[in-house]
């Protein structure tokens, strides 16, 4: 496929001669980014690095970074987020759109640390002096961060990657999960669903944005307790199920014999196949009963 309106530039730096030199990266410039979203997905999926929004006349620039570039970049294409106008860059993109703007991404190697990504971001901020950034300090939010120093230190020691959950109506930060596993265990989200949300920018239950990065454009923070989040997500799942009845595929995983794993298009088919009580199985599927059904079956919704 011909990559129209794309210029690919590679720059390799074998080693840092000076302490403030950025790590090596692949630089990709994408014109007409909105209509090239599929190409952006292919280029930036599961990649970490720095991204730059720049008007074609070079007068308006924004610099940001992410450890999951496509997940982060895709949020700028969401009308609900643009309409919040929470920061200068969102207000600008909401007003002028993407026709007179280009996207530049600096894709770094997978083994670079978050500190090296931020280092490159700061280097580009110092060089470009972007007028759409709230502040000119890389990784700065311009606002007090909701994550405590104790939490950050705990995550650093455990090498866990937190997941941020936002309500897209006003881009409100609702909760920070300590890790993917903690999120899966807490709100019963299936691994594949979580992966699609993080890698492809899909919204969870049509209402929530999941991100590996704390989104700088979010100015509203309403951190809930874990019990409140569980109750909120459970209520939203029930609404989602009514809106998308055909989409509620149930995944049955047998922890003792994975060969028995199977997907079911309805609760009735699952109960019939396992010769079990429908209401009891429903309580396990909904997460109202803890543990595994019959000590061996784990149920999750695919969506």
Image (spheres, rainbow, N blue to C red):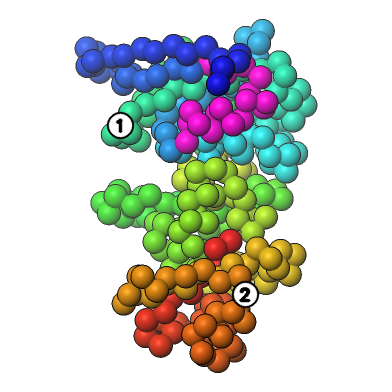
For numbered disc 2, what is the local secondary structure?
Answer: loop
As for residue 230 lying within the magenta part, the answer is no
Residue 25 visible (yes or no): yes
Compared across the picture, whether 282 is left or right of 150 comes to right
Q: Position of residue 37 (x, y in %)?
A: 61, 30
Residue furthest out toward the right: 95
Residue that mark 2 sits on: 266
Boundaries of the magenta span: 29-45
**Nearer to me, 122 or 163:** 163
Mark 1 burial class by Cα count in 10 Å: few <14, some 14-19, many 20+: some
**Nearer to me, 8 or 175:** 8
Res. 295 image quadrant: bottom left
Q: Position of residue 233 (x, y in %)?
A: 60, 67
Q: Quadrant of the C terminus?
A: bottom right
Q: Position of residue 159 (x, y in %)?
A: 29, 50
Residue that mark 1 sits on: 112
**Nearer to me, 158 or 30:** 30
Q: Quadrant of the N terminus?
A: top right
């Amino acid at each position: 496929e011909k990559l129209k309106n794309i210029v690919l530039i590679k720059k390799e730096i074998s080693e840092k001669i000076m302490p403030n030199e950025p790590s090596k990266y692949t630089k990709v410039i994408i014109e007409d980014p909105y209509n090239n979203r599929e190409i952006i997905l292919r280029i930036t999926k599961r990649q970490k690095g720095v991204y730059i929004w720049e008007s074609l006349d070079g007068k308006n620039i924004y610099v940001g970074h992410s450890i999951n570039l496509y997940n982060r970049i895709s949020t700028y294409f969401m009308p609900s987020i643009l309409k919040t106008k929470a920061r200068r860059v969102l207000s600008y993109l909401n007003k002028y759109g993407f026709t007179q703007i280009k996207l530049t991404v600096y894709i770094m190697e997978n083994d670079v640390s978050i500190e090296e990504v931020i280092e490159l971001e700061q280097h580009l901020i110092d060089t470009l002096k972007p007028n759409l950034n709230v502040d000119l300090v890389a990784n700065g939010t311009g606002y007090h961060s909701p994550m405590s120093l104790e939490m950050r230190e705990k995550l650093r020691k455990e090498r866990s990657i937190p997941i941020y959950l936002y309500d897209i109506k006003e881009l409100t930060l609702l909760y920070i999960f300590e890790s993917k596993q903690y999120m899966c265990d807490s709100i019963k989200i299936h691994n594949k669903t979580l992966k699609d949300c993080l890698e492809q920018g899909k919204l969870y239950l049509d209402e929530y944005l999941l991100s590996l990065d704390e989104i700088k454009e979010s100015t509203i923070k309403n951190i809930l307790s874990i019990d409140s989040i569980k109750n909120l997500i459970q209520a939203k799942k029930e609404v989602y199920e009514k809106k998308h009845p055909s989409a509620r595929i149930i995944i049955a995983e047998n922890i003792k014999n994975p060969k028995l794993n199977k997907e079911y298009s309805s609760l009735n088919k699952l109960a019939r196949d396992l010769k079990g009580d429908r209401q009891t199985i429903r309580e396990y599927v909904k997460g109202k009963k803890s543990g595994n059904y019959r000590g061996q079956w784990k149920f999750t919704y695919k969506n």
